[in-house]
Image: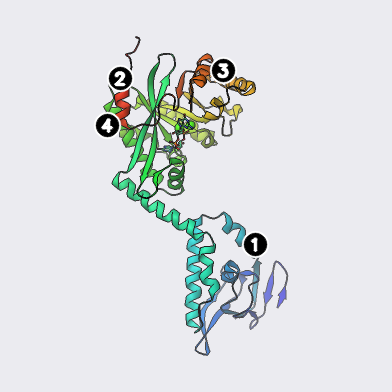
Amino acid sequence: MTTSAYRLKLAAGDTLFRAGDPPTTAFLIEQGTLRVTARHDGGDVVLGDLGPGALLGEMAVLDDAPRTATAVALTDCVLTPVDSKQFAERLEVADPIVRALLFSQLARYRAALATLSGGAVPASIEDTTPSRGSAHAHDKIRLESQLREALELKTLDVLLQPIWNIESQRVAGYEALTRWRHPERGAVSPAEFIALAEETSLIVPVGEYVLDAVCAALRRFPDAPAPFIALNVSGRQLRDAGFVDLVLACARKHAVSASLIKLEITESLVLDYEQVNTLIARCHDAGIRVALDDFGTGYSNLGHLHRLAFDTLKLDQGFVRRLDEPRCLAVVRAIFGMARALGCDIVAEGVETQSELDKLTALDCDNAQGYLIGRPQSVDDALQAFAAQRPTGS
Ligand code: C2E
Ligand code: CA
Ligand code: CA
C-alpha cells in the first residue's frame, strides 16, 4: 500500500480498512475494484463490489463512528482520500432537510448492519440524528406540509395596507400583505413562510393564491377612482418567464384592468439587471407598473439604477425612522431628487408618526404607507374605509 495525503495505491488483496477501525478518511475510487464485507453468523457477507467513481468509507467520517465493514482491494486500485472536513463544511451549509434525510438514512443503514452482524445498535447511532439539527429540519418539513394544507383550505389571508397620496389626501392604492393563520402557532409572518415557500416550488402556488386574491379584491373596489394593489414578487416568480402572462390571465379571469396591478420587486432581488429589465418591459407593454421595494437596504448600485425603468421607488422604513438625523435627511433628499429625475413616484414605507409624515411632506414625498395611515387590514375593512374617505377634489 503506498500512501500520500492526496493519492493512495493498493495492490490486489490489500485491506483498506477493517470493521471496528476508527474513522479516518473517506475515499473516492479512481481505478480498480474493492470488495466491502460485513461479519454475519461467523462468516463474511459481501455488501458490494465498488469501482471507479464510487465513494467508500464515507459513513464513518459522516458520523464519526467506527468502521462497520471491511474493504479489501480485489484488483490494484488508486484512491483519492477525502478529508472529513470536506464533508463537514458542506453539510454545515446544506439544507437542514437534506441533512436530516442523510443522517436518518445513515442511522437506519447502521442499525441494519448492526442487526446483520448480530450486534447491538451502537448508542452513538441513536444519538447522531437529533444532534445534527434534525429537530429544526422536522419543524420545517411539518411547516411546509401545513402550508400546503393552508393553501388548500384557503387559510392564507391576503390583507391590504393603504398607501396614502399626500397631495390629494386620499388612499391611492394598497399593498397586499399575506398572513398565515397557523392552527397552533397563530399568525405566522410572511418573512418566515414566504422564505420557506421560496426554498421549494411551493412559492408558485402561494404566489398564484395571492395574485388571485388581489384580482378578486380589485373587482370589489369602485371603478372611479379605482385604487391600485401592489403585489410582492418573489425571486422565483421574477425568474419565471411566464409570470407576466399569469398576471394578465388572472386579471382577465376577474375582469379587472391589469393597470391596477403593481408589482413590487425588492432591491436585493435586482441583481440580474437583464432579467429585471425584461420583466419591466413586459409589464409596461401590458400596462402593469413596477415598484422598487425596500430602497436603500440592498445593494443600491446607483451606476445601474438608470437602466431600470421602475415607476415607483419605495423608501425603506429605516430612513423614515431617522429623518431627524441631518445626514440621513441629506441622503433621503438626494434619493428623492434622483427618483424624480428618473420619473419615479415615491412611497415612504413604515410611516408611524405625524412628525415623520410632516417631514416627508416637506420633502415633497408623493405617498406614505405605514401604521399612521393604516395597518394591513381585511379587504372588507379596506373597502369600507375607502368608500368613507372624502371624494376626490373636495
Ligand atoms: P415589505 O414588502 O417591506 O412589507 C412591508 C412590511 O412592513 C410589512 O410586514 C408591513 O406589515 C410592515 N409595516 C407596514 N407599516 C409599518 C409601520 O408603520 N411600522 C412597521 N414597523 N412596520 C410596518 P409584513 O406584512 O410582515 O411583511 C414582511 C415582508 O414579507 C414584506 O416586506 C414582503 O417582502 C413579504 N411579503 C408579504 N406578503 C407577501 C406575499 O404575498 N408574497 C411575497 N412574495 N412576499 C410577501
Ligand atoms: Ca413590499
Ligand atoms: Ca418594503
For the residues labelled 3 and 4, say whether their Cβ atoms are less than 8 Å apart.
no
- Where residue 197 appears, as percent x and y from the top left, is 42, 46
For mark 2, does the 10 Å Cα neighbourhood hold few (<14), some (14 to 19), or many (20 or more) residues? Answer: few
**Mark 1 CB in 8 Å range of ligand 1?**
no
- Real-space CA distance between mark 3 and mark 2, rounded to the nearest whole angstrom: 34 Å
- Which amino acid does the dot numbered 3 rest on? Gly
- Which amino acid does the dot numbered 1 rest on? Lys
Task: Determine which residue is flagged by label 4.
Answer: 254
The local secondary structure at tag 2 comes to: helix
Foreground pick, 270 / 132 = 132
The local secondary structure at tag 3 comes to: helix
* Left or right placement of residue 263 versus residue 268 in this view: left
Task: Determine which residue is flagged by label 1.
Answer: 85
Q: Earlier in the sequence, mark 1 or mark 4?
A: 1
Find ligand 1 in the image and state its quadrant: top left
Q: Nearer the viewer, mark 3 or mark 4?
A: 3
- Which amino acid does the dot numbered 4 rest on? His
Numbered label attached to residue 337: 3
> What residue lies at 35% left-to-right and 23% top-to-bottom?
227
Query: Relative to residue 131, is residue 162 depicted above or below?
Result: above
